[in-house]
Amino acid sequence: MDKRISLLAATGLAALSLGAAAPALAAERAFPLVGPSALVLQPHPDTGGSKERGLHYELDYVGPGNSFPGEFTVTVDLTKAAGVASVRPDPAKPRPNCTVSATAIVCKQQGLSVGGAANANGVDLLVSAAKDAKNGASGEIAVTGRAEGASVTPVTTKLTVGGPDLYMGELRLESEVTAGEQQDLPLAFANRGTLPARSVALELDASAGLEPAETYDNCRPQGRGGRGATTVCLVEGEFLPGESYRLAPETPLHLKTTERAYQDGLRYAVVPDPAPDKGANQSRPATGKQLKLVKAPAAVPLTGSAAAAGHAENTDLNPGDNERSLEFTAKGARADFEAVTASPSGKVGDTVAAELGFRNKGPAVISHLRSGQSVARTDIVVPAGVQVTDAPLNCRAVNADGSDRTDRLGAPRYFCDGGLFADAPGTYTGRFTMKIEKAVADAKGSVTVGEPVAGGTKPLSFDPVAGNAKAAFTVEVKGGAGPSPSGSASASPSPSASASASASASASPGTSATATGAAGGNLASTGSSVGPIALGALGAVAVGGALFAGVRRRSGGHA
């Protein structure tokens, strides 16, 4: 449950003037302690011990410098948890300089650090229901902190004995899909816990080629990006223990396959009592319809296995059965991969640069997250007369025949890994720098995009346009013998370049920074939004892909 704590107040200066200028004073730094606002506990069983749950509080220094040198003290006040819960430090994550009593746990450390171990600036506890605590009993843990030269914002966690245990039923959908078709999503779940849920969030987290066909006013897409989106549906009501629930017949959900589909995934989940997300997109027009849930006439089938649902860990007694996942393969999916080349120029002795790689013109978004194989290889042949002085880290130097070589720089040829994901439209290039050593008449290299094979590439099975998978790569030498006019013409921008450039405006930060920084090992992307799908942390319902109600926390992409 690692959480990054942001510095809320950086050092500031306040000028005071009383007739004459006074010295500037530094504003006090403020650090927030972060931990869950609520935690539900399994009631103590008739025999054996009560199940413990982990609880983590942290104050993470993020600011000027790499550390905050003053002493930091965290105090866990247990007075209001008496008779409700048993609390102890987690022996698997010990903290030095801690004292433990029946009413408090106090830990001290010298200085705060940036990064490092997850519990570097915090404390880890194990919490279980007290032996005689009744179902529904509640208490709280109050955590305060003190740091030299800074203020610390406290946090309180409400403890409840018992709670909802939502179990998501299994869907059986066709795994081979076709663009334009829809499948029914008869979502259903049961509450197998000891207390009702006062509201639920239904989450559909779909990759790029899938999306919900219906829209409802209480369903909001979160964090839409190149890899997909999550739609969160908040449904108010009382969802009782021992009962099952399903979508109301008048408000169905269907999963639509789009032309962007290739290899896609769907994760669907239910989360009890989610906190509303203040950052949710509220710009969509109202439909006048609300997604509704009704009691199911029969219990939800208990077949199949569920994925872990970490985003429900604090409000659900057993978060491991809150979500499930499905995988799909689109029949007849097509994507046009086009080689991206360049034609730099300079004099002998100059160093020039070129962005080389490929673009996905679509319509399918190609993802190999499932297999872990690269979506494509870019085979770059360097023109004679120039020597590569720097190449992207995801490019491997080879000899002219494609065989391995030891020296990375100065190679006549490079194989570049295209990564696991290629959005549409999306451009994936890497920067090569080259020194012009001599003028060679009609010297031509090439850029080819294709499926990796020994010694080079072969045509991509999903690419219906073979003619643009290879392009000439030339370097014009001024004042000396250079490439023929036909060679330089081949390096002119293709008609799709402008579309790719416009797409880059919406790309997530970092997707086009460097070749090594592109998601999934891609060359730098200058035309795609490649933000990973992440389920949100419980207590802030936010996510990003097709319908998956709940609260964010984990990241993961779909195959």
Image: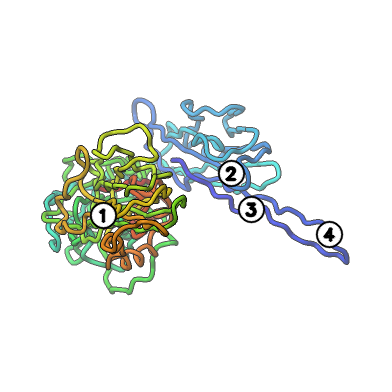
Task: State if disc 3 and disc 1 touch (CB < 8 Å).
Answer: no
Label at residue 138: none
The residue indicated by pointer 1 is: 206
| Amino acid type shown at disc 3 | Ala
Distance from Cα at disc 1 to Cα at disc 3:
38 Å
| Amino acid type shown at disc 2 | Tyr
Distance from Cα at disc 3 to Cα at disc 4:
21 Å
> Nearer the N terminus, badge 4 or badge 2?
4
The residue indicated by pointer 3 is: 10
The residue at the far right in this view is 19
| Amino acid type shown at disc 4 | Ala
Local SS, label 3: loop
In the displayed structure, 191 sits above or below 293; it is above
Instruction: Assess disc 3: are there few (<14), some (14-19) or many (≥20) residues with their C-alpha within 10 Å of its C-alpha.
Output: some
Q: Whole-percent x and y of residue 321? A: 27, 42
Local SS, label 1: strand
Q: Nearer the viewer, residue 256 or 506?
A: 506
Label at residue 61: 2
Q: Identify the image quadrant of residue 209.
A: bottom left
